[in-house]
Image (cartoon, coloured by chain):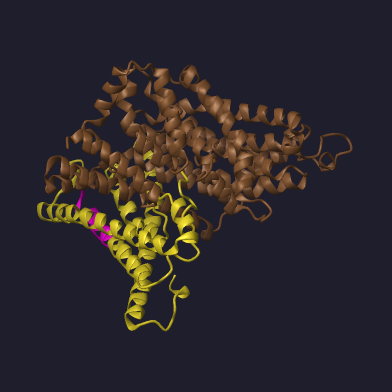
Amino acid sequence: MTPLELGLLSLGVIILLIYAGLYIPVVLALVSFISVWLMRGNFDLAVNLLTISVKDTISDYNFATVPLFTMMGLIVSKAGLGRDVYEVANQIFRAVRGGLGIATVAANAIFASVTGSSIASASVFTKVAVPEMRRYCYGKRFAVGVVAGSSVLGMLIPPSVMLIIYAVVAEQSIGAMFLAGVVPGLLLSTAFGFAILMMAWLVPRFVGGTRGGEDDDQNAEPLISFGEIMVKLVPVVVLILVVLGGIYGGVFTPTEAGAAGGLMALIIAAARRRLTVKGVWEALVETGHITATILFLIIAASTYSRMLGIAGLPTQFGEWMQGLDLNLALLMVIYVLLLIVLGTILDTASIILVIVPLFLTAVEAFGADLVWFGIVTVIGAEIGLLTPPLGLSCFVIKSTLDDPSISLADVFLGALPFAAVMLVVLVLVIAFPQISLVLVR
Amino acid sequence: MPSSMSTNGPADTAVSRRLDGALNRLLTGMNAIGSLWILVLLVIINTDSFGRTLFNEPFTGVAELVELSLIAIVFLQLGDTVRLNRLTRSDGLLTILSRRRPALERVMRICFDLAGAVLMILILVGAWTTMIHAIERGEYFGNQGLFVVPEWPVRVIVVIGTAVCLARFLLSSWLMIRGGPTTPAGQSSTAGFEAD
């Protein structure tokens, strides 16, 4: 077998084993190891490949952003910043039909700029927003669907660990990737908001909820005072200023911004008396687990992309795509379909690490912008988080939910309209690269 | 996880259960060190950036310390993520099989943990050589004259971290072969699956 055939065979075996349930880093590293061993007929060379990946891949200053931003997100979640933002958003949108849904989206968009995690957002807002919506008779599918849909904003609006992973894989600047996520993130939030208004109008039974008005008990509740709103919003604003302001003001590198943000989150939590030693410790342990999981996956994926390189697959793939006389639009259609299919069995980080090295050369050959390509990748992969059989956000919501009357199927059905909205936004982002590039280039 | 196993099993089960407990205590301990190390990372990066911005006094060698720390943190935590079944996987098929074909599910899980063990052995081969080189040649990170950190401590951590993962994979598959439960008690493999 030629190296190219071996490479293709390895790809097939990798997908098969991932689907069977073998640990993804083990699949990537082990199959790549065997593949290189067979291609070169040299066992020591294959061992060397693995050794270099372990030794050099994560020895990179930029990767410190992974534990730092993760920790910042976990601390602000524990400090109840998500609930604060939600309460303020509720007040603003309470008079609108479907207002609690729109408030959930808005709160998620803001919360996303101080965390970077879809899963953290999904679990925080499942606890905060779902009971509130249920209290005002919103449909159960709608309530969990809004939380699932808007949780993906965490990955798109900076800081986002997924954008960091893409930046490192595609050798783009982390700062540029963060900036590129802003407008698509806001566009997606707005689109979700409009979709909720439309649904409240077209399918009121799905949305449910009490209509805003004079006699409504929801409006009878006391308003939060202006002072209280400030108390609830100031910490978030300060964090955004420190982290994003620090990066774009040229004061911090992304790593330093992560460290400053983590410290700031600790200070805010302490100042609000929402910080216990136990809480900090739990956040640190959780950060450690997430960091080890992601960085070990990255180590394994680097073995895999070296294997692809040795097989010459990315180059061959690029030439093949050009030989087929494909245009970029058609290539992107194939790419997005692949992302959505993979999204049903894989998490976003794994999708980025498996698919991007394969497509990067081809996409570059078409003269496409790699920052734009990263945003397309992240949105496309996130659609999978909302779709069965293995939409992760939906699983997290179901397991966080304290309500046996809402089944996993309800979560998936509720999330479906939001997945559709994401697809529409993704098409827009692909068709109009300016949406992601306007702040960058 | 031993709590859900039969208490009057054969003698070798008793031994492997004690081994299991000891290994898990070691993994939790390593996890604690790794977690504290993250806090240290936060402090040194802040010291550097504030020192530089406010007092024009950077903390020399931060980049080198950060790079070494990342490797150390990952390998201190890896064993615990294996223990908690938090290593990224797509377990939809296994969940379905656990209801319909539990015997097949068990065989697959045993094979998968053994595959993990094989990978750890392969990593260990290279990590061991790297460690011996670092010790014998006194290799360091950084620029001579400016800031130098010896490389060997981190290489030792990689070897230990890989070895405990190997032990965890082997012991888990052994316990499953002996009829123990196929998933660690009280752990969901999707929690924090891709939290970022």
Residue A185 position within the rendered picture, expressed as x and y whole percent measured from the top left: 54, 29
Q: Which residues are magenta?
A: B149-163
- Which shade is chain B? yellow
Residue A176 drawn at (x, y percent): 41, 26
Residue in the foreground of this view, choosing between A352 and A423: A423
Q: Magenta span: helix, strand or loop, mainly?
A: helix
Residue B160 on the magenta span? yes
Q: On the rendered structure, is B171 left or right of A411?
A: left
Query: Compared with residue A198, is residue B98 higher up or lower down, i.e. above or below?
Result: below
- Front-lying residue, B20 or A13: A13
The outermost residue toward the front is B100
Identify which residue, A91 or B110, lies in the foreground.
B110
Residue drawn at 83 percent across, 39 percent down: A219
Residue A240 falls within the magenta-colored stretch: no
- Confirm whether residue A267 shows in the render: no
Q: Quadrant of residue B53?
A: top left
Which quadrant of the rendered structure holds the C terminus of chain A?
top left
Query: Which image quarter: residue A284?
Result: bottom left
Please state the horizontal and vertical placement of residue B116, each as a whole percent of the image.
30, 56
Q: Count the numbered circles shown.
A: 0
> Looking at the rendering, in which quadrant would you find the N terminus of chain A?
top left
Q: Which chain is brown?
A: A
A91 horizontally vs A23: left or right: right
What residue is rendered at 45% in x and 33% in y?
A378
> Compared to B12, does B182 lie above or below?
above
Is residue A342 in view?
A: yes
Q: Is residue B191 above or below residue A190?
A: below
Above or below B107: residue A190: above
Residue B158 location (% of width, % of height): 25, 55
